[in-house]
Amino acid sequence: MDIVMIFLMLSTLTPFLFIKLKKMPLAVVQSVLLVGMWIYYFQAVFSTAPAAFSPLWIIFYGGLFVSQIAWIMFIIYVVNTQDTKFNKSYQ
């Protein structure tokens, strides 16, 4: 469950990454998925885990997928902005 908590924390930051990248529709989608992800987490911790392919299960793993895409997009954005700053300083 520790790994799941780490992924949930990273997923909670994801809408802010989408806002930084100016991807507002994805920020809204991720915010909605976050609600389902936290509901799934609390249900799994304090009760039994929802069945595979249930709506909460799909929302949880969909949210994880979208958040990982966001982090990859953010890393590419940071590398590109650092690359342009680096090129300007040596011209």
Image (cartoon, rainbow, N blue to C red):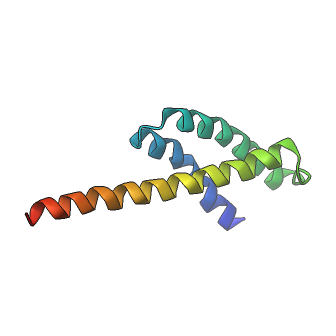
Kindly indicate the quadrant of the structure image that contains residue 4.
Answer: bottom right
Towards the viewer: 62 or 41: 62
Kindly indicate the quadrant of the structure image that contains residue 81.
Answer: bottom left
Q: Is residue 34 left or right of residue 54?
A: left
Image location of residue 57, percent across then percent down = 82, 49
- Tell me: residue 46, above or below residue 90: above
Which residue is found at the position 9% from the left and 66% from the top?
90
- Tell me: residue 32, above or below residue 44: above
List the single residue furthest toward the front: 91
Image location of residue 53, percent across then percent down = 88, 50
Image location of residue 29, percent across then percent down = 62, 36
Q: Is residue 60 left or right of residue 79?
A: right
Which residue is found at the position 72% from the left and 64% from the top?
1
Q: Is residue 88 left or right of residue 10?
A: left
Which residue is found at the position 43% from the left and 54% from the top?
74
- Tell me: residue 31, above or below residue 2: above
- Tell me: residue 54, above or below residue 24: below
Q: Decide if residue 9 is in sight here.
A: no
Kindly indicate the quadrant of the structure image that contains residue 56.
Answer: top right
Image location of residue 12, percent across then percent down = 56, 47
List the single residue furthest toward the left: 91
Which residue is found at the position 44% from the left and 38% from the top?
19
Quadrant of the drawing holding the C terminus: bottom left
Towards the viewer: 72 or 52: 72
Q: Decide if residue 18 is in sight here.
A: yes
Q: Is residue 67 left or right of residue 86?
A: right
Towards the viewer: 29 or 47: 29
